[in-house]
Amino acid sequence: MYLALRTMPSTPLAVRQELAAVLRPEAIRAASAADSVCGVPPDLVLEPASEAELAAALCLANDANLAVIPRGGGTKLAWGNSPKRADIVLSTARLNKIIEHVWSDLTVSVEAGCTVHTLQTALAQHGQRLAIDPLWPERATIGGLLSTNDSGTLRLRYGSLRDLVLGVTLALPDGTLASSGGKVVKNVAGYDLPKLVTGALGTLAVITRAVFRLHPLPHRSKTLTLTPRDLRTMQKLLSNVQDSHFAHTALQARTAHNAEPAVDILFDGTEAGIAAQEEQLRKIAGATRVNQAAPSVWESAREQWTMPDAQDGAGSVAIAKITALPAAVADAVGRIARSSALHGARWQLTMQATGIGSLRLDGPPENLRTVLAALREELQRAAGSLVLLHRPAELLSMDTWGEPGDALPLMRALKMQFDPRNTLNPGRFAGGI
């Protein structure tokens, strides 16, 4: 153990010795190049085997003024700004158990390092699921999912993760283990911790476990795709479906620089129920006419719901989460098309009916920088936003979040309350928090 620690010169010797006293030997290792966070190399990687070990290690790092980067499966570690410092990566990989599944109450308690796929497989044995469809479920963990608020396309019917999480247990920087919500061990008065830490990118505390509300698995699912002739028809289709009496599970628009728009709608339920809704959808499609005949309707694969990402391309790729008013989806697409054409970038967009979308841009880094900056400014003027999720190394200095708005003073006050020494993910969140 001493020989292993001796190769880690950046961390003070006293801290290394204290970590060795609270963690098992296999839980401490020197960081490698693969552990870098947005280009910033850490010194140590810690993998505690229990909540108590994690809290103790976090407290030691906090007392020594070391910067800690929480990590789950690492699938979204590129999200957020580059950290100002990165001394220790604190991994939840060993906290991977499903603690309690009360199937009769439709709830589950699970440790933060459990992968989404592992959890869903266990729940399916009782005909249940956590109603989310996030990116990379085989590797994405529950803690990382909550920290990034990656709810996916099912949020239209079931709500976002903030609606599904009932309780959390957190390790605070001072070593306190605090719980709030369902399955309460200890309450922190005045804060709704489950909602507060969802989407906070690990800047307030380290999630160690969570309790979720579950839903039954559907008897059958079917995706139908409509092919409108232009963006005006696409917007009208989205609005008409949303204004209908459908019990649809998800609704999205897909388009790209070299493709016609498409609208996908997902139905869950019984065979008869889906058939009835499909018939009604065809009537709505027939009534939605803009200059030409009705758009066609055809059955398509579940894979149509996969969001654009950077995993399947060579060269410079940027991925951004964009938001727009639901009634202005077509306007947002028009802005993207014009700006991309003007500055030499290829684009692909999947936009949920809720106004939340995933945009992929391909092109030379400086072209991407120009397009992203112009789009962010245009979307913000139209009550939308653009948040960078992935960008090439040449754009690491570009701000991820854009204008944080009037909420920034409140966010800074919360950061000071929970993490006064700026130990967790320093500089990674909006406004440099």
Image (cartoon, grey):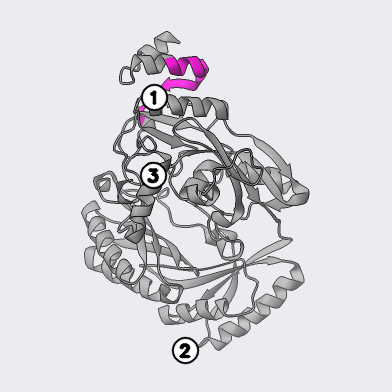
Q: Quadrant of the N terminus?
A: top left
Disc 1 residue crowd, few under 14, some 14–19, many 20+, Cα 10 Å: many
Q: Secondary structure at mark 1?
A: strand
- Disc 3 or disc 2, which is closer to the eye? 3
What label does residue 44 carry, if any? Answer: 1
Residue at 74% across, 45% down: 102
- Disc 3 or disc 1, which is closer to the eye? 3
* Type of amino acid under label 3: Lys
Residue at 44% across, 57% down: 308
- Is residue 31 magenta-colored? yes
**For the magenta stretch, what is the residue range?**
18-33
Q: Position of residue 152 (x, y in %)?
A: 53, 57
Residue at 52% across, 49% down: 190
Q: Position of residue 122 (x, y in %)?
A: 70, 43
What label does residue 292 carry, if any? Answer: 2
**First reached walking from the N terminus: tag 1 or tag 2:** 1
**Residue carrying label 3:** 415
Q: In this orientation, does residue 203 appear?
A: no
Q: Residue furthest bottom?
A: 291
* Type of amino acid under label 2: Gln
- Is residue 60 magenta-colored? no
